Amino acid sequence: MKITTLTNPRQVVLVTSSYKNKDNVITLDWHTPLSFDPMLYAIAVAKVRFSCELIKKSKVFIVNFMSTDYEKEILYCGRHSGRDLDKFKSTGLTREKAEKISCPRLREALAFLECQVIKEIETGDHILFIGKVVNYQLKKKGKRLFHLWADKFTTTKE
């Protein structure tokens, strides 16, 4: 049995990262707030993922909270590596310039957290990136997607 059998459902997010003109989008459901003051947020990224490499080098990431309307794009970003293709082009997701860090965010997101990495913790096969939230916004309300297992999802009332 996997740990996610016990811990899911968990909200699915798309995390954007960028380094030297190479942008990427990864699907994650291992993420959590850590502190109000200072405002800290953490994401866990598998060491083998391209996004892990980009975040380690750039020291920034953006957590994009997505609506249920983007289930197809969320699945795509979780199944394909950005090493060999541009997920923005492949999915039609739109880059939007971040205000405080050098990393694109997603225009389609319901909300976002722009994060500056302040600590990395090796946790077995993942790296836990702890980010100081330097900018955030709830852009619009909508139903959010929660991962159950495999390709199965649930949602909220709003």
Image (tube, rainbow, N blue to C red):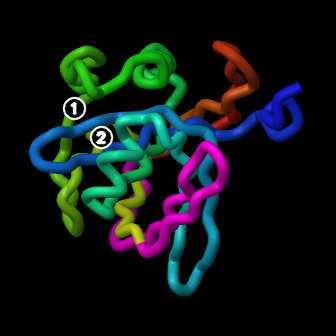
Q: Which residue is mark 2?
A: 106
In the image: residue 20, left or right of residue 58: left
Q: Which residues are magenta?
A: 118-139
Asked whether 90 falls inside the magenta stretch, the response is no
10 Å neighbourhood of mark 2: few (<14), some, or many (≥20)? many
Image quadrant holding the C terminus, namely top right
Q: Looking at this view, is 39 or 131 the one in front?
A: 131
In the image: residue 41, left or right of residue 149: left
Report which quarter residue 30 is drawn in: top right
Q: Residue at x 89, y 25 (%)?
A: 1
Asked whether 131 falls inside the magenta stretch, the response is yes
In the rendered image, residue 127, in percent from the top left (x then y), is placed at 54, 53
In the rendered image, residue 3, in percent from the top left (x then y), is placed at 82, 36
Q: How many numbered circles does the render carry? A: 2
In the image: residue 6, left or right of residue 138: right
Q: Residue at x 24, y 20 (%)?
A: 84
Q: Earlier in the sequence, mark 2 or mark 1?
A: 1
Q: Which mark is residue 36?
A: none
Q: Which residue is mark 1?
A: 94
In the image: residue 126, left or right of residue 5: left
What secondary structure is marked by label 1?
loop
Judge whether 131 appears above or below 50 on screen.
below
Report which quarter residue 7 is drawn in: top right
Which residue type does callout 2 highlight? Leu
For the residues labelled 2 and 1, the Cα–Cα distance comes to 6 Å
